[in-house]
Amino acid sequence: MIARILYVLLVSLAVLFLLAPILAVIPLAFNGGSFLSYPLDGVSLRWFETFLTTPPWLMALGNSVKVALGATVISVVLGGAAAVGLHALPNAWRVVVGGLFMSPLVVPSVVLSVGLFFLFARLGLAGHPLSIMLAHALLGFPLVFISVAATLRGLDPNLDLAASAMGASRWYRFWTVTFPLTLPGFWTGAIFAFMTSFDEVIIALFLSSPESITLPVVLFGSLRDKLQPTIVAVAVLLTCTSALFLAALGWLGRPRQAAQRTTETR
Amino acid sequence: MSRVSLYLSTLLLVALPVAYVAFLYLVPLGGVALRSVDNSTIHANLPATASAIDEAGAPSDEVAAALAKDLAAADRRSLGELARLLNLDAPGMRSLLLKTKRALDEVEVKGLADLRAIDPDWDEPIYWQALAENAQPYTFRYYATAIGLDRDPAGGWQFGAEGAIYLQILLRTFWMSLQVAVIACLIAYPLAHAIANGPPTVRVLLLGAVLLSFWMSILVRTTAWVVILQREGLVNEALMALGLVREPVQLIFNRLGTLLAMVHVLLPFAVLPLLNNMKQIPAQQRDAARSLGAGPFESFLRVYLPQTMRGILVGAGTVFILSLGFYITPALVGSPGDQLLSYYIADFMLKQLNWGMASTLSVILLACVLLGLAVAWLVNLLWRPAARAA
Amino acid sequence: MSIRWKSLIAGLGVTVLALPGLAQARDFTIASWGGNYQDAQRTVYFAPFAKSQGDIRILEETYLGGLAQIKAMVETGNVTWDVLMIERSDLIVGCDEGLLEELDWDAIGGEDQLVPQAVHPCGAGNVVVSTGFAYDPARVKEAPKDYADFWNVEKWPGKRGLRAMPKSTLELALIADGVPLEQVYEVLATPEGLDRAFAKMDEIKPHIQFWEAGAQPVEWLAAGDVVMSTAYNGRIALANEEGRDLAFVWTDHTYSMDSWAIVADSPNKELAVEFIKFANTPEPQVEFPKHIPYGPTNKQAVERLDPEASKMLPAGANMERSLFIDEQFWADNVDRITERWNAWIAQ
C-alpha cells in the first residue's frame, strides 16, 4: 500500500514538473494588465494584437516561415534521397553514412554555428535568409532521413518483387509502389524538419542579420531584455503550432515510432 | 537492370546528401579547427617583418625598418584587424601600431631609434616578442590560453595567475551536465513506468504530455521557467501562501533555477529511451517475483531495476551529451557563474570578435562531445552481452 | 466585429503581403537601436531631415550592436546601411578597421560646436548616455550617496545589481576604494591597480546580481530583488515617468556617447554627411531629451536645456562629478582584463 501511494506520488510530481510551468504561463498571455503575474487583471487579447500589429515581430514571423519552408523542402529532397539510396546499400554503409547524416543533431549548435558563420561570410551569404535555410536543412534532413528509412524498413519487400516480376522498371516501381507507401514517412519527416527550423534559436542567432532575423531570435532577445506579456503571447502561439503539428503527426498514424527514433539537438 | 547500374543509381542518390553534408558540415567544422590555429592575418600583412625577425624577437634596426615598410604598405582595414589580433598577445599593441602607422606619414623610419622616437613603448620587449611569435602562419596561443598558460617574460610558457579558467568552465560544464542527467533520469523513471504500465487513458495522456513538451520550442519552456521562478512568480507566491517563507526567495539567476530549467527541457530525452526499455519487460515477471515472496521494494530493486539499466544509461547518456552544448537555457536563467562553455564561445564570437578563441573553445567542446559519444558507443557495445548473460 | 478583431485580421493580412517585398531598392537607410530610442530619433531627426531634403524616403533598420554585421556588409560589398548610431567602443574599433568612413568635420559643421569628447575621426557624438546607480527610496532607511555607500553592505544589506562586464564596473570599484576620478585609468592600467579593483570587487561579490540588459535593473529595483543597482539614467527616468519612484545617484556616474557614423562605401554618402550636419545642430538636440532622457552634445543645446528637465539628464550640474569611459584604454586592455574577469566570476 505504501509502495502504491509512493508510486502515485512520484508519478504525479513528475507530471507536475513536466506540465505545471507550461500550464501556469499560458493564461498570462491573456492578461488584461501589463504584468506577468497573478491574479489576472481581466482577460484580453491585447498582447496577441500587439504581436500581430508590431512590424518587427511580423517581419520575424515572416522570415521564420520563409526559412522553415525552404529548409523543409531541402530536407525532404536530401533526406528522401539519403533514405532511399541507403536502403539499397549494404548494412555497413548504412551504419557509417547514416551515422554521418545523423551526427549534426548531436554536435553542439554553437560549434556548428561558428563554422557556418565563417563559411557563409566567405561565400558572401552572411546575414542572408538563404544561409539560415541551408543551415537548418542540416538539422532537418536527418529527421526526414530516419522517418523515411523507418517506413522503408516496414515495407513488404514482396511488393517490389511482385512489381518487378510484372516487368516494371526500377524507377517506375519506385514512383508507383514504393513512394506512395512511404509517403507518410515523408510527411512525418517534413513536419519534423519544419518544426526544427521554426523553433531553432542558436544557428539563427549567429547567422541572422536584422533583415533576416527570425521569430525565436527576437523572442530570445526580448527575454534577455524585458519580460512583457507579448513574449508569452508569442510563446502561446508557438505552443499552438507545436500542438497542431503534433496532432498532424498523430493523424499520420505513427507518432510514437517516429518520435522514439528522433533526437533533436538544442 | 543490372546489379552494377542499380548500385550506381543508388550511389548517385546518396551522393547528393553526402555532398551537402561534406560542404555545409564537414568543411565548416574543419574550418573551425583551422581557425583555432590560424595566424595568417598577421603573417600575410607583415611579410617583411616576419622574415627579418628572429625567433626570440630581438629588436634591431633591420627589423624596425622592415616593420615600418610593412606598416606603410598595409591598408586601414587589414591594419586594424592586425592590431586587434596582436593586442591579444601584448595589451596596448593596438594603440601602439595605429599610432606608429599614423606617424609614418611624417617620419621616415630607418632604425630602432626612429620607432622609439614615435613611441617609447617600442622599448618594451613584449611587443617584439609578440611580433616574433606571430611570424609563423600557425599559432597555438589560443590553446595555451584555453589551458591557462601565459607567456613568461623570457618567452617561454608559464601557468597564468588567473589559473586555468576555461578548464574550470569545462569542468563546470561536465559537472552540471552530469547533475542534469541524474536528475532527469530520477524524474523520468516513474513517468516512463506509468506510461509503460498504466491504464490506457493515463498512458495516452502522459505520452501526449511528454511528446508535446518534446516538440515545444526550447524558448517557450525556458520562458515558462523564467516567469514562474521570478521574484513575484508563482513558485514564490505559493511558498509565501503556504507560509514556508516570509520573503520571496531568489530562484532565478542561480544554479538551482538553471538546473531545473535544463532538466525540464531535456526530460523527454530521458523518458523516451526508458519507455522503450520498460515496454519490453513482461509484467508477469514482477508478478512471479512477488509470488515467490519478494516485497514490492525488493522485487523492484532485484528484478525490475536491473532490467531497465540499459534504458537509464541511454537516457542519461543522451541528456548528458546534449547538456554539454547547452547555451540558451543557462543564458536566460543562469547567473554569469552558471554558464557553460557554449556561452563563452558565443561571447567570443559575437561580442568580443575574438574568433580564434571562439574556434579553439569550439574544438574543445566538440572533442568532449565526440569523447562522450565514443564512451556511449563502447558502453552500448559491452552492455548488450552482459544484459543477455544476466 | 470589434476593432480589436479587425486589427488582428489586418495584421495577418500585412504579414502575408509583407513576405515578398522585404528587400527594396536602396533608399537612404539609417540604423539605430530600435524601441523608444529610435521612436524619438524619428520624430526629432529623421522626419524633419527627410522634409528638408524634399520629402525623401528614409528607410530605418534596427542595429543590435557589435561590428560583425558591418564587417560582413563592407567585406561583401553589399552595404545596406548608410548612417548608423554606434556605441563609442565599436566606433573606435570600426574606425581603425576601416569599416566606417572618415568624416570631414568642416562639412558637418566643425568640431567647435560639440563638446570635445563628441569629436572622433569617424563619428559625431550625439547622445550622452550615463550609468549611475539607482535605488528605491521606499526600501532604504537612509539614502545612499556614493559608491562607498554602494559597497557598504552592512548599512544597506541586500543584493547589488552591476553590469556583467568589466568595463564601467572595475572603474566603480576603484572609485569606491577612494581613487580620484582623474586617476582611475592610470591606476587601472597598473597590475597593482587591477588587483586593487578586483580586491574591492571581492568585498561585495556574494551580494552582486549581474545584469546584461538595460531593462533588468529597473525591474529588479521595482520588485525589490536588489537594493541598489547601476542603471542607465534614461531607463530610470522612463520608469519614473511610467509611475515608478526610483532615485538616481549622479555622483561619480560614468558616461559614454552614442555617435552617428557612416558605413564605409555607403552609396548615399552625400546625404549621410548632410544628415550628420543636421544632427550636430542645436535645434534637434534640444528637442531630443524631451522625448527620451539622454543628454545632448552640442554646446549650445546643453546651455539651452530647461533647467528643471535637465535634472534627470547627463548635463549641467549632473556632470560635475563624472567619469568619461576611456574606450581607448578598454580597446587596448579588454581581452586581458576580460579573461581575468571571467576567472574571477568562475571562482
Image (cartoon, grey):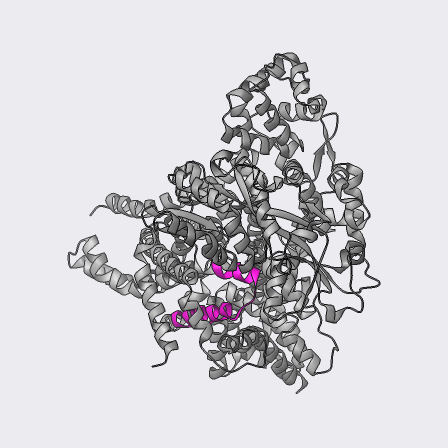
Can residue B383 be seen from the camera position used here?
Answer: yes
- Determine the residue positioned at 73% across, 68% down: C137
Q: Residue at x 77, y 68 (%)?
A: C140
The answer to whether A69 appears left or right of C98 in the picture is left
| Position above or below: A76 against B228 | above
Q: Nearer the viewer, residue C65 or A244?
A: C65
In depth, the one of C233 and B223 nearer the eye is C233
Q: From the viewer's perspective, is A12 left or right of C176?
A: left
The percent position of residue A233, horizontal first and vertical second, equals: 47, 71
* Rendered location of residue B330, percent (x, y): 60, 59
When the figure is inspected, residue C1 is found, relative to residue B225, above or below; the finding is below
Image location of residue A15, percent across then percent down: 56, 77
Q: Is residue A217 magenta?
A: no
Q: Which residues are magenta?
A: A218-245
- The quadrant of the image that shows the C terminus of chain B is bottom right
Examine the image and state in which quarter residue B265 appears: bottom right
Dominant SS of magenta comes to: helix
Residue B276 visible, this orientation: no
Residue at the far left: name it: A167
Provide residue A187's location: percent of width, then percent of height.
Answer: 32, 64
In the foreground, A188 or B145: B145
Q: As drawn, is A48 to the left or to the right of C237?
A: left
Residue A222 falls within the magenta-colored stretch: yes
Q: Residue furthest right?
A: C154
- Classify B139 as above or below A255: above
